[in-house]
Amino acid sequence: MNAGIIIIGDEILIGQVVDINSSWISREMNKIGFRTETVITVGDDGKSISDAIDKCFEVADVVFMTGGLGPTKDDITKKVICEKFGTELVLNEQVLANVAEMLGRRGIALTENNRGQALVPATATVINNAVGTAPGIMMEVPSNSLPERSRRVELVGRNKLLFSMPGVPFEMRYLMEHEIIPQIKKHYNLKPVFHKTLLLTGIAESILAEKISDWEDSLDKNVKLAYLPAYSSIRLRLSVYEPDDNTEAYISAKVEELKRIVPENIIAYEDIKLEELVGKLLKEKHCMVATAESCTGGKVASLITSISGSSEYYKGSVVSYCNEVKADVLGVSRADLEKYGAVSSTVAEQMASGVRRLLKTDYAVATTGIAGPTGGSDEKPVGTVWIAVATPTRVVSRKYVFGKDRSINIERFAASALSMLIVEMEK
Amino acid sequence: MNAGIIIIGDEILIGQVVDINSSWISREMNKIGFRTETVITVGDDGKSISDAIDKCFEVADVVFMTGGLGPTKDDITKKVICEKFGTELVLNEQVLANVAEMLGRRGIALTENNRGQALVPATATVINNAVGTAPGIMMEVPSNSLPERSRRVELVGRNKLLFSMPGVPFEMRYLMEHEIIPQIKKHYNLKPVFHKTLLLTGIAESILAEKISDWEDSLDKNVKLAYLPAYSSIRLRLSVYEPDDNTEAYISAKVEELKRIVPENIIAYEDIKLEELVGKLLKEKHCMVATAESCTGGKVASLITSISGSSEYYKGSVVSYCNEVKADVLGVSRADLEKYGAVSSTVAEQMASGVRRLLKTDYAVATTGIAGPTGGSDEKPVGTVWIAVATPTRVVSRKYVFGKDRSINIERFAASALSMLIVEMEK
């Protein structure tokens, strides 16, 4: 089954806002067996929106629209839907009550603009928005109401579906998770999809593909394998779209086989971010961690603290962007800084031990490298980083060499630091 | 004039990679007077790409494609171009030499796959890629080679232009800046556009719009004003698309008028990021800065160090995610932590003073707040942050209250910290 996505907003077409909704929707829909065929971004303009709906339905069974629902934008999306599908806006009392209550809690009186948010197309199903004032909308679209070109991929016996949602990412996500995905499953009578995700590190995608190619060929035809590479890690996702009673046991057996092929590389058996896994392992161990960062400049700390509840296991970081701070605050030896340079195994290890001691934690991870674009040498080119992990029993360090792009290097250095910490904790 | 953008890649349609190319292209093209009419994302599939080209040319004079040029993807984009515009792939010796040299520098031998990168459509203009192996391509597209619907917005007397670029962001940016934008200016004989950008802080967009509405109305008709809001700052961009000898003086006078209307809010007279402005001001003053972060968890440090050369003025940070670190490392009074709580003016100020003293800097900025979603109270709800700035002569602090979303709060807290630091430095 196919999905199409329409992102509405002038602010996106002038490059002021980066669209993060379409990738999220694609990822979530992929999990229930939908393939996104196209994403079309258009401005706050009726004809463009209407054309985009036609174009999406040419290739998709379900179309998601985000944006164009705010009180200031004159609710253009809802008007377009009405004109396109021959209906009209009517006041929905339940939505109005929700808007009034939301505003009331913030001590704001209802304006005419806000009343507009309670107007919905008469033939639409309203999707309650518990986290904002603009409701979501679902239209069942009979294929004969679409241009001829759009009828080709019609799912026999079911109307196509059009969803309109607010553009605010967390409101969109709330509606998708709590209301829309369940509705889609019900409408198309979808069977649950079985997924098993493994998280791997320390191996390049191409090498992994080669190593596991026989194993991959041995998988049942109804098992789909997806490689999802990220900085310093790869997710392998096994999906079974029509699972039966044996599926779970079959997949478990296949995972056991895989463990024998790449025993060093699997760090998790679930779909989890590196920074979440760090937290999970620390909580299991009732341990605390600290970080000492040079070249990553706070990125490792920022990733760890992006997780709600991280104060349970994260004490803090010393970002030592100059050697003076490495020596004065972290206690790195000035002689070693001189002798080996800041980007060295010795300094990385002393930074990790130093911050572990200073912040009184069980674990610590440290980074020191050259993010670029300047500062490299023949011996230590841009993209070089030393990462050290201090544990209750030992200190280890490792060198990585990445590319030339500063922002990508910082991302990779930070992800590698989290991976190394995880590997040490799992030993 | 209108632009269209086609983003090619299965990895984008499954939500694995967020497209950041289209917003960058839109922003840059906007500066030379183009409006992006649509962005279409499609998979690595010939028919989808071909259809997207038609759809884009229906509304655009210039179409940009990124992706589908890598050695592993079988160069599908170039094949589509050949089929569509009745030409064939030919080996370009100059591109081959560039590919061989690039690989040679990394000690890699030329493979058949790499030779494929030197194949280009015979009628295309090759755009040299000095930072990668895949070349860019420019096709002049006569409107009579496009479907009838696509001919409507043809620029009289000029062919439409189709550009194909690698999907790697920094390669795409290199090609756009060094080759493609100059080619477009030349092809369409574009006059330079005059832009003046002002950076403002400490004022909401709606209040700013109200305050300056008379001034806005007084602007010459050929001056376009754009509001570009970001976290904790707003850019105002004045654009004149057909500048003459008086333009600069006229805009300067208008900026002077604006300074009288919002004297407290303008922090820069150029298009600059907050973290870049922090660096610029510190370099001008020959001063160093440090940060102490609680709720922002390293985000402020991360922003400052995202700028190349930041080691010239940034010494480091203490991320004190727990009170123990605030007291032990930064020297915040335990009694005050107890009495006022960690999220307080007193603690923020002691954190700023503490890190300024510890890292021996001229300036310091500190954050302490509740990013959420948990940890709030009636008195200090989620979204509350205290920010303090320590200067050579004083320490100031201020409270802000934002929303409920953790990641957005962290972004806003960090941007507000940079803004406060800038305002203090400019005093």
Image (tube, coloured by chain):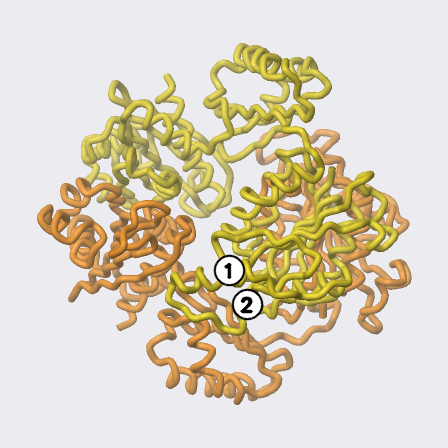
Chain colours: A orange, B yellow
Q: Are marks 2 and 1 on the same chain?
A: yes
Q: Determine the residue positioned at 38% across, 19% down.
A: B426
Of the two numbered discs 2 and 1 in the rendering, the one whose residue sits closer to the viewer: 1
A220 vs B253, nearest the viewer: B253
Q: Earlier in the sequence, mark 2 or mark 1?
A: 2
Taking the view exactly as shown, the residue that stands out farthest to the left is: A335
* Residue A289 makes an appearance in the image: no
When the figure is inspected, residue A137 is found, relative to residue B177, above or below; the finding is: below
Q: Determine the residue positioned at 75% across, 65% down.
A: B83
When the figure is inspected, residue B176 is found, relative to residue B250, above or below; the finding is: below
Q: Secondary structure at mark 2?
A: loop
A269 vs B399, nearest the viewer: A269
The residue indicated by pointer 1 is: B133
Q: Determine the residue positioned at 36% across, 25% down.
A: B281
Label 1 marks which chain's residue? B
Horizontally, is A64 left or right of B104 in the view?
right
Quadrant of the frame with the C terminus of chain A = bottom left
Report x, y in % for residue A257: 42, 87
Q: Amino acid at mark 1?
A: Thr
Report x, y in % for residue B314: 29, 36
Horizontally, is A423 left or right of B68 in the view?
left
Report x, y in % for residue B298: 34, 44
A73 vs A111, nearest the viewer: A73
A87 vs B312, nearest the viewer: B312
When the figure is inspected, residue B286 is found, relative to residue B371, above or below; the finding is: above
The residue indicated by pointer 2 is: B71
Q: Are marks 2 and 1 in contact (CB under 8 Å)?
A: yes
